[in-house]
Image: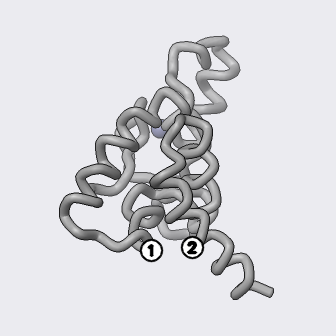
């Protein structure tokens, strides 16, 4: 899967939690927008024109099913989708895919344990 690009300015973005300063790459902020675009759209009162992550989730599932088919391990799913295991598990539960959520949740728990 290609890097995420800002839905507005098309610049490459990194997931916010993995973003490193001074790399010239924008962090994802919200609604598929980089920080610059998000704040510009917010000031202009146009934020509701950009789909939230839950709308983007349908794209997620399509991508995820493709990853499953290609034999990608659940450990790789969050990275490939540019999110965290915890966030992905939550989204999958919320959108009625507990079968996939359980697999990701196991990884999220392991990651939390490793960080302690
Ligand atoms: Zn942007």
**Which residue is at a point 54% across and 35% down the rendered structure image?**
95
**CB within 8 Å, label 2 to label 1:** yes
Give the left or right position of residue 115, taking residue 58 as reference. Answer: right
In front of the other: 111 or 4: 111
- What's the coloring here? one colour
**Which residue is at a point 80% across and 87% down the rendered structure image?**
116
Number of numbered discs present?
Answer: 2
For marks 2 and 1, the one nearer the N-term is: 1
Q: Is residue 106 above or below residue 54?
A: below
Residue 63 x/y as whole percent? 30, 48
In front of the other: 56 or 101: 101
Q: Is residue 25 above or below residue 47?
A: below
Ligand 1 lies under 8 Å from the Cβ of mark 1? no
| Residue 75: numbered disc | 1
The quadrant of the picture occupied by the N terminus is bottom left
Q: Which residue is mark 2?
A: 107
**Which residue is at a point 37% across and 62% down the rendered structure image?**
80
Image-quadrant location for residue 115: bottom right
Residue 85 x/y as whole percent? 57, 63
Image-quadrant location for residue 38: top right
Q: Using the rendered image of the protein, determine whether residue 1 is visible from the camera's viewpoint.
A: yes
Secondary structure of the residue carrying numbered label 2: helix
Give the left or right position of residue 46, taking residue 6 as reference. Answer: right
What is the residue that sits farthest to the right in this orientation?
A: 116
- The alpha-carbon separation of the residues under discs 2 and 1 comes to 7 Å
Q: Is residue 65 above or below residue 96?
A: below
């Amino acid at each position: 899967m290609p890097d995420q690009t800002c839905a507005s300015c098309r610049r490459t973005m990194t997931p916010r939690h993995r973003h490193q300063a001074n790399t010239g790459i924008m962090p994802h902020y919200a609604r598929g927008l980089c920080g610059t675009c998000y704040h510009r759209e917010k000031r202009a009162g146009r934020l509701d024109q950009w789909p939230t992550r839950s709308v983007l989730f349908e794209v997620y599932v399509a991508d995820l099913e493709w990853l499953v088919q290609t034999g990608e391990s659940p450990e790789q799913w969050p990275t490939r989708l540019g999110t965290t295991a915890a966030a992905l598990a939550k989204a999958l539960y919320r959108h009625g895919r507990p079968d996939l959520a359980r697999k990701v949740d196991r990884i999220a728990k392991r990651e939390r344990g490793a960080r302690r």
